Image (tube, rainbow, N blue to C red):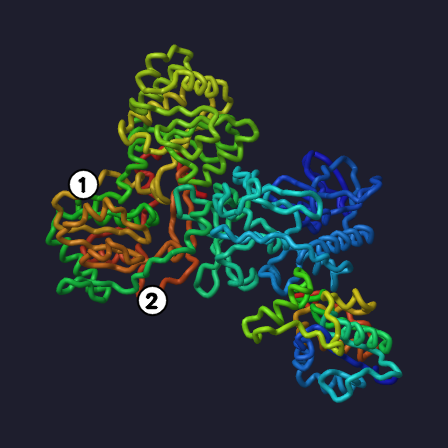
Amino acid sequence: MVNLTIDGKNIEVKEGTTVLRAAQSAGIEIPTLCDHPELTPYGGCRLCLVEVEGARTLQPSCTLPVSEKMVVKTTTDRVKEARKFVLTLLFSERNHFCPFCQESGGDCELQNAAYQEGMTNWPLSPNFNTFGVDASGPYFVLDNNRCILCRRCVRACGELVGNFTWGFEERGAKSYLVADYGVPIGESSCVSCGTCVQVCPTGAIIDRQSAYRGRDAQVTKVPSVCTGCSIGCAINIVVKDNQIVRIEGRWGEGVSDGILCKSGRFLPLEEKRERILTPMVRKNGSLKAATMEEAVAAIATAIKSAGSGVAALASTKLSVESLSLFKQIFSDGLKSSMVTTIEEGAMTSASASFTDSLKKSFESKIDSMNSADCVVVVNTDLYKEHQVLGFMVKRILPSGTKLIVIDSDENGFDPFADVKVKAGKGSNVDILDALQSAVKKQKVTDEAAKCGVKEADLVNAASIISSAEHPVFIYSDKLSAKDGQKAVSALIDLAGSVKNSAIINTKGKANSLAASQLKLDKPFEAGKHQAYFVAIGDDEPTEGLLTDLEKAPFLAVSAAYHTKLTARADVVIPVEMWAEISGHFISMDGHLQKTSKSLTAPEGVFSDVDALKALASALGVKTNDNWKEAIKSRVSPVEIVEA
Amino acid sequence: MAKPKIASDWLAGCAGCHMSLLDIDERIVKVAELTDLRATPITDLKEPDESGVDVGILEGGINNTYNEEVAHRMRNRCGLLVALGDCAVFGGVPAMRNFFTLEETLRRAYVETESTEPNSAVPSDPELAKPTEVRALQDVVPVDIYVPGCPPSPEVIFHVLSELAQGRRPEIKGDLLDWH
């Protein structure tokens, strides 16, 4: 520990702490612009200059490490003059005219800094040099004229997302932000995760969806959890007038510490589907508006006459509460033979059944990525799916972490891989077994030939894996598509043959693991059921599901949006979409998290829980709210912890 | 103490700051009681007294030789000079044209605009003031008090006027500091 004095206050902090963080920990505010809690210090803007006793010049507090008996002053006239001068230079350099900028009025950190210093004018007038504006990207606009060269975006893109799209061209005051080697953003390597938009302190990177739709002072930020995939990133849903203005990551919180992907940040605002606003019952061949009582009665009648010939499917985007009720009604109450999810356990059943036989958890938390020095990606394309997990892989590659991609198909991570193991033939079990043999330093010529894999690739991959301190294996249950739990078992054997290994399974949608814990994970066989019930929520039906249900004698659907599925239903119940629900979700690595209701549902729309309870009472099925017990009835592949 | 004499004028602005001044509503009666309001664009007297005024208030930036003349005249005849609003303080919205050349902006305004007659030209009457690039007031004459805002809110303007009327130099800070 190091002792120092800041503004007369004695502070004790860990060695290596910067003066800025030490001050912040003691509640002393030092104005900053280029600093960001999630990024490495850069010392670019010089707004955080402080006076250090014994130092000849003012020092940037954000990059200055504390030292024993250091005496720092943050409010002297010299410091205040310097701050004003720094701001004066920043304002003189580009177009920082506030009346025509969407950040103005509270959201601009540059403007706020000037207010804080009490600046009523710019001592040096701007020079009116012009820079380019790039509006080629789908989700944000880059206006270099508003840029203060703080490079938060560059650091965020590289350090947090591992994408390294942003960079700077030219030097000094002529510097400007470019994507890749100076291509338009829309044609660049940008993955539209929007992290740069969230860190930009000025109006240089502008969010197209939320620009001019409400300043921070005019909106409500509802902390919640993203249900776009099974990672469960911590988000703030930014709401105004019962509409979502924007979705932000919550810095330093949740699984991803505030990083989101395109699907979490931007796509939810592109919802174009039409909302279902009333219960509907098919009469004389067409769906007619009905009361909730009529709709529930119609479903109950059809189900009762179908006996156990009822099949029920739920979306894995439903809350645990809803999934539990769904199971109680159809599995426990009606004893239906076909109760599952529309994911059909495809992303979880192999690991779940392996866990059943193992009788203990074998998968790791996502934070095991923090110490990974080797990542083996097996049959999952993190460039396209579960992108945030992909960011966590890509961002640790520059520090020397090795990447091995095992995938018979083309994988978005191929270009970054140290070794790619591409199978020509043979099963995943064979490849994983061969790799394990190679790790054990056995000769694998024959096995390589059997799988159609290059022997050198196997040997190289094996040597990387076995020399790693903390190898992390990331797989999806696509791995087991052909060979079931044998493939999972082969992967576990491989991981088990090296020390300190961790295994992460990406699973499917937001509540994939919860559905698996409730044993809603069997393959769907359309069969000859008399009645079908689909609780699809705001999910979209697959073509396969539509085909399977084409000849359903009776189909009831609870859904938020009009889809091809609701179009062919006999009864439709309108339910809430994700932002209207407050419910629990279990992430891929077992974090039990609760989403918050950020929007009020339109009148006449029911929560899934209420709709299912109404159905249960019409069917005379008793239900309970003990979902927390229910998810523990089976050992989970990964330990479930309440977040 | 004699009532302080106040004169105002507008330059390359939109008159919005003077509108905001009128928005102080009934408080203007108080201002009129406490001060000697002289020339303003919204009263009959158009030029500040040759004998001088205590406070000169200018709205708008400087975008031609006539604005320069008005600014110099006000500066010469007033004690304290107040730059009122974002245009006078920073250059404001009119300064957007500085990102283009003067020729480009004039051609766009007088020749290329969708509503102009065919064969129209940039006016060149020698009686007209010569356009210049848009500057903040401080780039032409020394300014004593800056009142930013687009426009400054009536509260800010009343605060400034009431401080001046009582012989104090107004300070713009806290909630009153808002550039928009």
Q: Residue A2: x, y in percent?
A: 72, 35
Residue drawn at (29%, 47%) of the image: A315
Q: Nearer the viewer, mark 1 or mark 2?
A: 1
| First of labels 1, 2 by sequence position | 1
The residue tagged with tag 2: helix, strand or loop?
Answer: loop
Separation of disc 1 and disc 2 at Cα? 36 Å
Give the residue at the far bottom of this rendering. B44
Relative to A425, residue A251 above or below:
below
Residue B178 seen in this snapshot: no
Q: Which residue is mark 1?
A: A525
The total number of labels drawn is: 2
Q: Amino acid at mark 1?
A: Glu
Relative to B164, residue A429 above or below:
above
Location of residue A634 (image quadrant): top left
Relative to A470, residue A168 above or below:
below
Task: Say if labels 1 and 2 share a chain.
Answer: yes
Q: Amino acid at mark 2?
A: Glu
Location of residue B162 (image quadrant): bottom right
Q: Nearer the viewer, residue A497 or A374?
A: A374
Quadrant of the image containing the C terminus of chain A: top left
Q: From the viewer's perspective, is B13 left or right of A639? A: right
Residue drawn at (54%, 53%) of the image: A141
Quadrant of the image containing the N terminus of chain A: top right
Q: Residue A326: x, y in percent?
A: 26, 49
Q: Residue A604: x, y in percent?
A: 30, 65
Q: Mark 2: few, some, or many residues within 10 Å (few <14, many ≥20)? A: few
Residue drawn at (53%, 47%) of the image: A184
The circle on residue A603 is: 2
Q: Nearer the viewer, residue A143 or A311?
A: A143
